[in-house]
Image: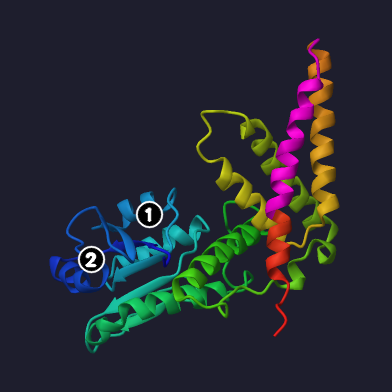
Amino acid sequence: MRSVLSICILTGSDEFTQLLSPYLGETDQAETRSDHYICHQFGDPESTLDYLRSAHVDCLVVQAIPELQTLFDGLHRQAIFIPTVIVEPVGETFRFAYHPALLALPTTQINQLRLTIDQAISKFIQLQPDPVIPEDAVSSESSLSHRLMAQQLRLAEKLKERLDYLGVYYKRNPQNFLRHMTPLQREELLRQLKADYREIILAYFSTREAHLNEKIDNFVNIAFFADVPISQVVEIHMELMDEFAKQLRLEGRNDEILLDYRLTLIDTLAHLCEMYRRSIPRES
């Protein structure tokens, strides 16, 4: 079964909504589903931005309206980057600043919308972080670049499933590998990985944790794109176990419970090893 894409729509008119319906499904409600897409529709940039701050969206499909730049400015300030298709009126071309992978689609070619969505995702997957991440971003450049790459990997896997072929994938950039980073970049990445792994440990045996797999996937994606050695992940695990053991002893509690967290390490390493295995080119 082909992967279903999550689409966010910003529309400025009922006519635009009706224009999209034959290709995305009936979009006269806040959320609609079809065999190809899950669509979330909004009528103004503010509510769209609020939704995108917390949702995983595979592509934006937006009407070319003057207010659109407000949305792009807000996303750029938050360092949120999403593949985007801008549907333009006949005979008009708008200039919007967001990221270099924007695709424009004239309304006269709206029958190519599905193909254009896949092309927008494919183009986004090939983006390099340097021209994308804003100088005044809300977090460090190293952290943001790895968040971008994790998003690219997620979309690459989804697009690969959707198109049913193995040729669409994101090639890791050796410049982003841990061993090629400056000491400051390396320190920042390892600090981020340790913090993310600590959240995984704290959530691993919680029956109320609904996003554990997502936490593990995000950790593994960052480690994969930075080509972090397996031994480094083991070292992070051991450091945290030592810290937890010291805290438990200070509290007069038995630290044998920490042995159970070997399952956390095994689970995480299994995910990472699978990523590395799948990245090895197949013999023809």
Look at 84% across and 37% down and name the residue there. Answer: 238
Q: Is residue 174 left or right of residue 161?
A: right
In this figure, which residue is indicated by the disc labeled 2?
Answer: 25
Counting from the top left corner in percent of width and height, residue 263 is at 72, 37
Counting from the top left corner in percent of width and height, residue 51 is at 37, 50
Please count the marks in the image. 2
Q: Element under label 2?
A: loop
Counting from the top left corner in percent of width and height, residue 120 is at 44, 76
Residue nearest the observer in this picture, 255 or 68: 255
- Mark 2 residue crowding within 10 angstroms, few (<14) / some (14–19) / many (20+): some
Q: CA distance from mark 2 to mark 1?
A: 23 Å
- In the rendered image, the quadrant that contains the C terminus is bottom right
Q: Is residue 263 magenta?
A: yes
In this figure, which residue is indicated by the disc labeled 1?
Answer: 49
Question: What secondary structure is the stretch in magenta mostly built from?
Answer: helix
Look at 74% across and 62% down and name the residue there. Answer: 226
Above or below residue 53? Residue 251 is above
Look at 81% across and 53% down and name the residue there. Answer: 230
Observer able to see residue 100: no
Badge 2 or badge 1: first in the primary sequence? 2
Amino acid carrying label 1: it is Leu
Amino acid carrying label 2: it is Gly
Q: Element under label 1?
A: helix
Looking at the rendering, the stretch of residues picked out in magenta corresponds to 252-271
